[in-house]
Amino acid sequence: MSKNKNNPKQDRGSLLFKLTLELLVVFLGVTAGFVLNNWRSDFQERQLEKKYIAGFLQDIQFNIEELETQIEKDSTWLERASPLVLSMADGFSQRILR
């Protein structure tokens, strides 16, 4: 005769332990899957964030260079145009006074 048939309480306890252990393993597996999925998603978001920040910094650097070039051009233009503007202003003020 089988030992299992002789002791039904032990069978029930053993079955309950096995089912609890199996449920725990499934629970831990699903939880680990969610944790890993969240970690991967967060990692991808951080990588994308770094990419956007790098692009933003690149754009800022480009804009600074463009502004410096434009300021240099405008300064040169003002230096060349100042005498002409001043002479025109003098001529205009003399016409008004006449």
Image: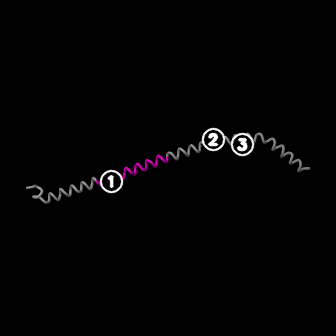
Looking at the rendered image, the disc whose residue lies closer to the viewer, 1 or 3, is 1
Residue 12 image-quadrant placement: bottom left
Q: Quadrant of the N terminus?
A: bottom left
* Magenta-span inclusion, residue 36: yes
| Amino acid type at mark 2 | Glu
Residue 81 image-quadrant placement: top right
Of residues 56 and 94, which is closer to you in this image?
A: 56
Q: Residues within 10 Å of mark 2 (few under 14, many from 20)?
A: few
| Residue designated by label 2 | 65
Mark 3 lies on a secondary structure that is: helix
Mark 2 lies on a secondary structure that is: helix
Query: What is the x, y in percent for residue 61?
Result: 59, 42
| Amino acid type at mark 1 | Val
Residue beneath the point at 42% across and 50% down: 41
Where residue 12 is drawn, which disc sits there? none
Q: Marks 1 and 3, Cα distance to the nearest angstrom?
A: 65 Å
| Residue designated by label 1 | 30
Q: Marks 2 and 3, Cα distance to the nearest angstrom?
A: 14 Å
Q: Earlier in the sequence, mark 2 or mark 3?
A: 2
Which stretch did the figure color magenta?
26-49
| Residue designated by label 3 | 74
